[in-house]
Each structure stands twice: as structure tokens, then as C-alpha cells.
Amino acid sequence: MTWLSETRNSYDADAADYAEETRDLLERKLHVRAGVVLFADLVRAIGGGPVADVGCGPGHTTALLRELGADAFGIDLSPAMIEIARREHSDARFEVGSMTDLRLADASLAGVLAWWSLIHIPDDAVAGVLAQFHRVLRPGGVAAVGFHVGDDHGDRTTRASGYLRQPSRVAEWLREAGFTVESQHLLNPDEPKPGAILFARRPASPSR
């Protein structure tokens, strides 16, 4: 898949600068940080367990999850990002991998966080990614997805952009993958490129 290699190469080339740019992002964007805190709380409410930060980049969000008491580890497509994450957060587990093919056992996780990482997945590949999230979550497990909001009209495969989507569309994709959507948060609705966070759950009993 060409878009996967393009995304990997883009992040590899800019890993150090990106890590520095985003180092205090969760302190500057408190509504986004609150989403991470809520995710950790939801995982704790189901008894805890392993949590995958999928598309973890340099590991800043993974580190926050661990500070919040979550048993979090990071997965990223970019080897350069994983190298930085391992160096800066040596107490955490980080591995190179793709959300299109998670090397994780079925029903092995309590939570999956995709924090502005699904934005690099083309529409026709989203269903497969969400099916991976559903597969690796145990019944009752929590998924949280953050993304840019808008209507996409062009090629969005570079690191600087990402696909723009409406929350209703992402919610429908989650339902089609077997999730129950529990909450939707719209961030900065008055700005040119708002954000959204959706919280969903793999039902404790089969939904289809």
C-alpha cells in the first residue's frame, strides 16, 4: 500500500522536529488532554488491563496514560518515532507496527486509543482498521478516536494534512465494525479545522 509507505517515510523524515513540536501539546490543549484522562478513567472502570496507543508517535500520550495508571504501550508505523519514544520513555513498551494489521491476540486489550492517527487512513481502509480494533479489544473494552473535522476533497496522505471527516461518519464506521458509540466531543468548533473525539465500546455481548 503506497499510502502506508508514504506516511511512514514522512514521519521518519520529520520525527525529531515532530517530537519537539508536540512535547507540550497535551498541556497546551487541555480539552484534548481531558479526552486522554477520560479514556483512562473508562478503562479503570472496567477493571483495567493492557491499553494500546495506536499511532503513538514519540510516545507523549502513552506516557500520560501511564502517569494516569493505565497499563499503556505504544505502536507506530514509523521506526524513527519508536526510537524516540523508547529513548524518552524507557519505562514503557513501544513497537513498530501498523493499525492495519495489529500483531496482538484477540480480545487481549482493555482499551485502544487512536489519537489523531486514523487521519492518515484512506476511507476504503478504515473499516479494516476498526475491525482490528474490535478484534483485539475484550468484550466491554473501550476505543477512543480523535481526528480532524471537515469535508475532505483531495489527497490527504502527507503528515501535515490528514483526512478530514465528520463525526457522524466516523460514528457510523464504528457501529458497522460492531462498536457501540457512547460519547462524542467536538473541539474548537469555531476554528477553521475543529477536532472531535469519539468514545466507543465493544459490547459485552455480541451485537450482530
Image (cartoon, rainbow, N blue to C red):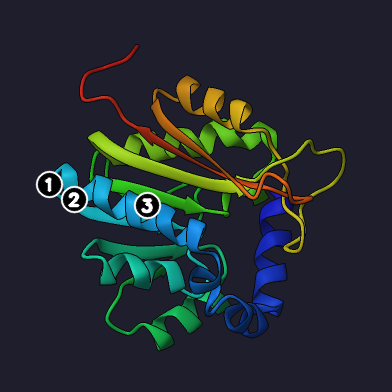
| Residue 59 occupies quadrant | bottom left
> Does dot 1 land on a helix, a strand or a loop?
loop
Q: Position of residue 204 (x, y in %)?
A: 21, 25
Residue most extreme to the bottom: 87
- Residue type for callout 3: Arg
- The quadrant of the rendering that contains the C terminus is top left
Compared to residue 52, the image places residue 128 above or below, namely above
| Residue with the mark numbered 1 | 47
Amino acid type of the residue tagged 1 in the rendering: Gly
**Which residue is located at x 36 percent, y 82 percent?**
89
Q: Which mark is residue 44?
A: 2
Among all residues in the image, which is located at the extreme right? 154
Q: Percent from the top left, x then y, of residue 7?
A: 69, 60
Viewer-nearest residue: 84 or 5 = 84
Q: CA distance from mark 2 to mark 1?
A: 5 Å
Question: What is the C-alpha distance between the residues marked 3 and 1?
Answer: 23 Å
What's the distance in space between the residues labelled 3 and 2, CA to CA?
Answer: 24 Å
Q: Does any portion of residue 109 appear in the rendered image?
A: no
Per the image, the residue denoted by label 3 is 103
Q: Secondary structure at mark 2?
A: helix
Query: Of the residues shown, which amino acid type is indicated by label 2?
Result: Arg
